[in-house]
């Protein structure tokens, strides 16, 4: 059975070795946030931390959030609430399936009460919230300033963080990226790799979580490495994931981290990340998303 406790001591930095890195004289380290917990892994714990603290301080005994049927956030939220001693409710986008997938089973087993809503009603958040009373709400993906505040602590787990010229992460809601910008040095460029196709509101979503002086820092969102869209995983991406596993023993996921690492490689090869740079990739977890793949698709 999975545990409900977090072990921050398990986070470490892994240095990758490859000919394309050697040729470009680039250091590429990966901050293995995926190690802190088997479910509430990666950035999830950091984004939820201050929401749950606030919920407890406010005396809340129940918290709710939004997400899709395959949402890593939904699963992580259920586990984090379980650890905090708070009842959890998940508003799930889409009709209730005849049988729950692995993600929803995990959430339910962690005590989450699941409420399914059709896709048109799902976006009317205020109407949904009125159906519940005495409940603490957290936006989808942990989006908001408390989420960014928690994500700002991520870089403190990277030894010698000042040496990096570039910090790269996957972007879903932009919450983690905003946190990284908050804590980055003025000499560091933060690059976000969008997991979605043509989501050009991401930059404004990130900026809305930043103070005016933080918006002056160096950062950008890349939209070229989504492999067809959110959670799309063509054969080329799966092949890349298996190659990375064989070469580096680094597990990645089909939604975020594989596309992020692929994007980093291309940015290094096309000199967007110039020769001689030191790069830190944030491994944001979410490996359980790979369970949607047929057995033996991946080598790990």
Image (spheres, helix red, strand yellow):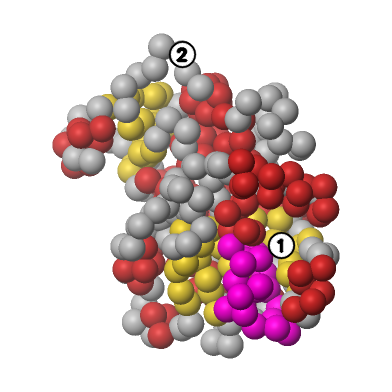
- Residues 115 and 172: in front is 172
Q: Residue at x 47, y 37 (%)?
A: 71
Does residue 54 sit above or below 185 in this rendering?
above
Magenta stretch encompasses residue 146: no
- Comes first in the chain, label 2 or label 1: 1
Q: Which mark is residue 99?
A: 2
Q: Quadrant of residue 164?
A: bottom right
Q: Could you tell whether 87 is left or right of 21 in the image? A: left
Magenta stretch encompasses residue 273: yes
Q: Residue at x 19, y 40 (%)?
A: 124
Is residue 286 in view? no
Q: Position of residue 32 (x, y in %)?
A: 71, 56
Stretch of the chain drawn in magenta: 263-282
Q: Position of residue 62 (x, y in %)?
A: 39, 34
Mark 2 closeness class: few <14, some 14–19, many ≥20 residues within 10 Å? few
Q: Could you tell whether 135 is left or right of 49 in the image? A: left
């Amino acid at each position: 059975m999975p545990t409900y406790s977090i072990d921050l001591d398990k986070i470490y930095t892994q240095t990758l070795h490859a000919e394309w890195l050697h040729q470009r004289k680039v250091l590429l380290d990966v901050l293995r946030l995926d190690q802190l917990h088997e479910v509430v892994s990666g950035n999830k714990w950091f984004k939820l931390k201050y929401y749950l603290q606030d919920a407890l301080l406010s005396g809340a005994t129940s918290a709710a959030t939004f997400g899709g049927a395959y949402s890593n956030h939904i699963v992580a939220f259920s586990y984090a609430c379980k650890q905090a001693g708070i009842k959890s409710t998940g508003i799930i986008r889409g009709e209730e399936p005849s049988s729950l997938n692995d993600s929803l089973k995990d959430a339910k087993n962690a005590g989450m009460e699941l409420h399914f809503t059709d896709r048109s009603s799902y976006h009317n958040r205020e109407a949904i919230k009125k159906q519940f009373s005495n409940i603490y709400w957290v936006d989808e993906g942990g989006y908001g300033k408390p989420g960014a505040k928690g994500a700002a602590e991520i870089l403190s787990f990277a030894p010698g963080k000042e040496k990096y010229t570039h910090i790269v992460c996957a972007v879903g809601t932009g919450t983690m990226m905003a946190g990284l910008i908050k804590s980055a040095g003025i000499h560091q460029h933060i690059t976000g790799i969008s997991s979605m196709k043509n989501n050009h509101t991401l930059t404004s979503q990130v900026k809305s979580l930043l103070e005016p002086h933080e918006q002056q820092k160096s950062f950008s969102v890349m939209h070229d490495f989504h492999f067809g869209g959110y959670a799309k995983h063509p054969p080329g991406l799966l092949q890349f994931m298996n190659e990375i596993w064989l070469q580096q023993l680094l597990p990645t996921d089909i939604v975020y981290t594989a596309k992020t690492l692929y994007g980093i490689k291309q940015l290094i090869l096309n000199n967007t990340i110039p020769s001689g740079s030191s790069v830190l990739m944030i491994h944001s977890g979410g490996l359980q998303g790979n369970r949607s793949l047929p057995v033996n698709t991946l080598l790990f």
